[in-house]
Amino acid sequence: MSDQAARLVVLVSGSGTNLQALLDATADRSYGAQVVAVGADRSGIEGLARAERAGVPTFVERLDDYPDRASWDAAIAERIAAYRPDLVVCAGFMKILGAPTLRAFPVVNTHPALLPAFPGAHGVRDALEYGVRVTGCTVMLVDEGVDTGPIIAQEAVRVYDGDDEHTLHERIKSVERGLLVDTVGRMVRHGWTVTGRKVRLGP
C-alpha cells in the first residue's frame, strides 16, 4: 500500500459503536485508512452524531424519500461515489445495498453469527434457539444476496447456559468491533484477492 491513507465511507443505521471503533483506529496514521464520510438511512441517530463530533462529513438517504427501491439504490451509490472511497464499510447498516453500489465499490459488512449458519436479521436469536454452544461473528464482502458474500474473517464466541439474546449479542458485538477494525486495517494495508469464495488478505 502507498503512504496515502485508504478512503473509507462508513454506513450506519443506529448507535454507531462499530463506526466509533473505526474512528478510533484511524486516528493512528499507521492504521492506513481515514473515514472520509458517514452515511445513514435515517436521521437523528447516534452514529451520525459520532461522525459529526469527529468532524467527518455525513449524509442521509432515506428509502421513504424515493418512489422505489431502484431510485434509492442509485441515489445512495451516487452519494457514496462523491467521496471516492477505496472501501465501503457497513457498520450496523440495516439496508441491503443494490447493484449500483456493489458494482462500483468493494463493500464489507459484519454479521453476528458464524456464516453460513444463521444468516438474516436474527442471527443471534436463531443461534440461541437452535441450541449451539459456540457462535460468533463474521466479516464478509457484500454481494447481492443476504449474508451470502465471501467470508474474510470469523471469530468464535462461546454461548453460556444463562445467555439470553441481549447478553449474547453484547458479547458478540464486543468481539465484532475488534474483528472489523483488524480486518479492515489488514485489507487497506496489505490488499486482498478473491478466488471463488475464498478471500486472501495480503499480496
Image (cartoon, grey):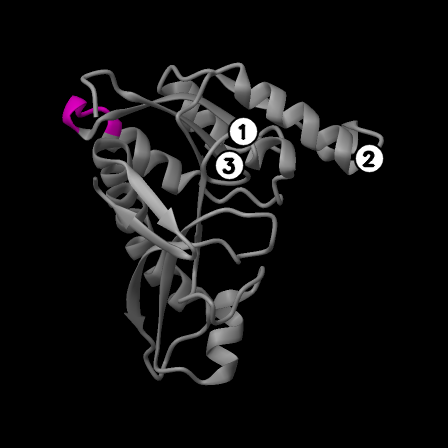
Amino acid type, callout 2 = Asp
Question: For the magenta stretch, what is the residue range?
Answer: 26-30
Q: Residues within 10 Å of mark 2 (few under 14, many from 20)?
A: few
Decide: is 57 above or below 118: above
Decide: is 143 above or below 23: below
Judged from the image, the secondary structure of the residue bearing numbered disc 2 is: loop
Q: Earlier in the sequence, mark 2 or mark 3?
A: 3
Query: Is residue 29 shown in magenta?
Result: yes
Q: Residue at x 28, y 50 (%)?
A: 200
Q: Residues within 10 Å of mark 1 (few under 14, many from 20)?
A: few
Amino acid type, callout 3 = Val
Of residues 193 and 64, the one nearer the viewer is 193
Mark 2 — residue? 68
**Residue, far left:** 30
Mark in the foreground, 2 or 1: 1
Query: Where residue 52 sits in the image (x, y, percent)?
Result: 43, 19
Of residues 70 and 51, the one nearer the viewer is 70
Q: Earlier in the sequence, mark 1 or mark 3?
A: 3
Judged from the image, the secondary structure of the residue bearing numbered disc 3 is: strand
Query: Is residue 148 shown in magenta?
Result: no
Quarter of the image with the N terminus in it: top left
Magenta segment's dominant SS is: helix
Mark 2 touching mark 1, by CB under 8 A?
no
Q: Earlier in the sequence, mark 2 or mark 1?
A: 2
Q: Residue at x 56, y 65 (%)?
A: 122
Mark 1 — residue? 104
